Image (cartoon, rainbow, N blue to C red):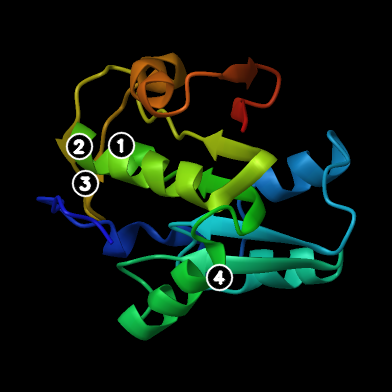
Amino acid sequence: MTANVQKITSQKTDVNYKSGRMASTFKIVNEKFNRWGGDETNLDIGGGAGEVATNYLDALYVENLTYDPYNRTAEHNQKVLARCLNGGAQTVTINNVLNVIQESECRKEVLQLAKDCVENGGTVYIKIYEGNKSGQGSETSKGYQNNMQTMDYFSEIKDVFGNVSVDTAHGLIIIDA
């Protein structure tokens, strides 16, 4: 799907898979925003190899499709894209993904994928891990970390979506498509 290539891949950044944890975004969206109520599809971009979020959303009658070029097979990702492109998802989640991609062009491709997959009237939820907040990116033992604050991603997000708001209480970027 991506035309640009990450110099340092995100393959080892799937820390939730090994620990059996789920990104906090899913519970925040469910409990604070009461967003998921069944019979809908969420696309989880960069969701890793695990199924914890999928199982959580399954209990809410939400189909969770995970697209991850580094932790899922090409065949799996192609099937997900076939279902989601052209507005096939009511919601899209991007959890701690943009912050592990060094190249702005690659981050914009992730955002464009979200835009292409969320239906008109749907919502995109983005969570950023800010690292040490220095703005100085660096290689880590698991890949790369931008160390940028959430607000530092806004220009890239606005370039793709235009309409952006932030829930500062939970550190979520919320985009109404």
Residue 43, percent across and down? 58, 58
Residue that numbered label 3 is attached to:
140
Position of residue 122 relative to residue 59, above or below, is: above
Q: Amino acid at mark 2?
A: Glu
Q: Quadrant of the N terminus?
A: bottom left
Cα–Cα span, label 3 and label 1: 22 Å
The first of marks 3 and 1 along the sequence is: 1
Residue 24 placement, left or right of 34? left
> Regarding mark 2 in the picture, which secondary structure is present there?
helix
Q: Determine contact: label 3, label 2, CB under 8 Å.
A: no
Q: Earlier in the sequence, mark 4 or mark 3?
A: 4
Q: Which mark is residue 83?
A: 4
**Is there a contact, CB below 8 Å, between mark 4 and mark 3?**
no
Looking at this view, name the residue that lies furthest to the left: 7
Q: Amino acid at mark 1?
A: Lys
Residues at discs 1 and 2 in contact (Cβ within 8 Å): yes
Crowding at dot 1, Cα within 10 Å, few <14 / some 14-19 / many 20+, comes out as some
Mark closer to the chain start, 1 or 4: 4
| Amino acid type for the residue under numbered disc 4 | Arg
